[in-house]
Amino acid sequence: MRERSDIIAGLSTVIVEPENEPTALVAFLHGYAMQPSDLVPFAHSIGTAATFFFPQAPHLAEPSGCAWWNIDLDRRRAALVQGPRDLADEYPLGREQMRAQLMRFIECIRHERPHLPVVLAGFSQGGMAICDLLTHEQLDVNGLALMSTSRLAFQEWQLGERRFRDLPILVSHGTGDDDLGFTAGERLRDWLLDSGARVTWIPFDGGHQIPLLVWRRLRQFLANISTVHPN
């Protein structure tokens, strides 16, 4: 695998690509207070021929890293005192601009290889951003991978749930997640199933993270999509 950087649709992006023709395109959105470099090493070691795109979110986060939208840190701290959260009733500002930029980003990455399947992957806030995008926009993708995430703006999302029908979706969540509760992951899973998605559910013993088990299942997930949608 080789690595390079580029600006795509205004987003600083790290690209990890195979030496030969890729079998899929994966846009991977990091979580809150993270940056692409937190995830890039896994693309080198996952052992798949996909090309990975890791865009950096446009907003600065506290205490470091970036965010897809700003959050009220005092409110977040107060909520966490009560225990792990489910964000289904949260409606953060700035999502419309985020969706527009992500639409341009996806259009750009698939421009040179329109024949390849496209998978959107996201961790935590990145997973919410992906679902928010699909429930509001007409977007043709071949699979989703949602890791340690939650529903968000759920009344809005329900209006677009038909867009998940028959879509392969990997959903993972740690039973000991102290940020976004395990029940939040279960409720996301159940809603996607009710929407007609083909869900692969991966619970694991652990916290707010992407363990080796999930990376292995992601590799299998990508291989299955590449087989169904050959070059």
Image (cartoon, grey):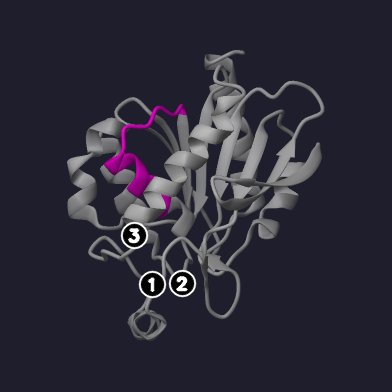
Q: Earlier in the sequence, mark 3 or mark 2?
A: 2
Label 1: element kind: loop
Residue shown at the point (33%, 49%) measured from the top left = 132
Residue shown at the point (26%, 64%) measured from the top left = 91
**Which amino acid is tagged 1?**
Pro
**Which amino acid is tagged 2?**
Asp
Q: Is residue 139 covered in magenta?
A: yes
Label 3: element kind: helix
State the separation of the CA atoms marked 3 and 2.
11 Å
Res 42 visible: yes
Q: In which quadrant of the rendered image does the C terminus lie?
A: top right
Which residue is at the front of the view, 220 or 167? 167
Residue shown at the point (39%, 65%) measured from the top left = 181
Along the horizontal axis of the image, is 150 left or right of 174?
Answer: left
Q: Mark number for residue 178?
A: 2
Image location of residue 197, percent across then percent down:
33, 32
**Disc 2 vs disc 1: Cβ atoms closer than 8 Å?**
yes
Image location of residue 190, percent across then percent down:
29, 44
Residue shown at the point (26%, 44%) measured from the top left = 191
Which residue is at the front of the view, 32 or 47? 32
**Magenta residues, dominant SS class:** helix
Q: Is residue 134 above or below residue 113?
A: below
Q: Earlier in the sequence, mark 2 or mark 1?
A: 1
Task: Determine which residue is flagged by label 3.
Answer: 183
- The range drawn in magenta is 128-142
State the separation of the CA atoms marked 1 and 3.
9 Å
**Disc 1 vs disc 3: Cβ atoms closer than 8 Å?**
yes
Task: Determine which residue is flagged by label 1.
Answer: 84
Res 202 visible: no
Image location of residue 116, percent across then percent down:
57, 21
Q: Earlier in the sequence, mark 1 or mark 3?
A: 1
Q: Mark number for residue 50?
A: none
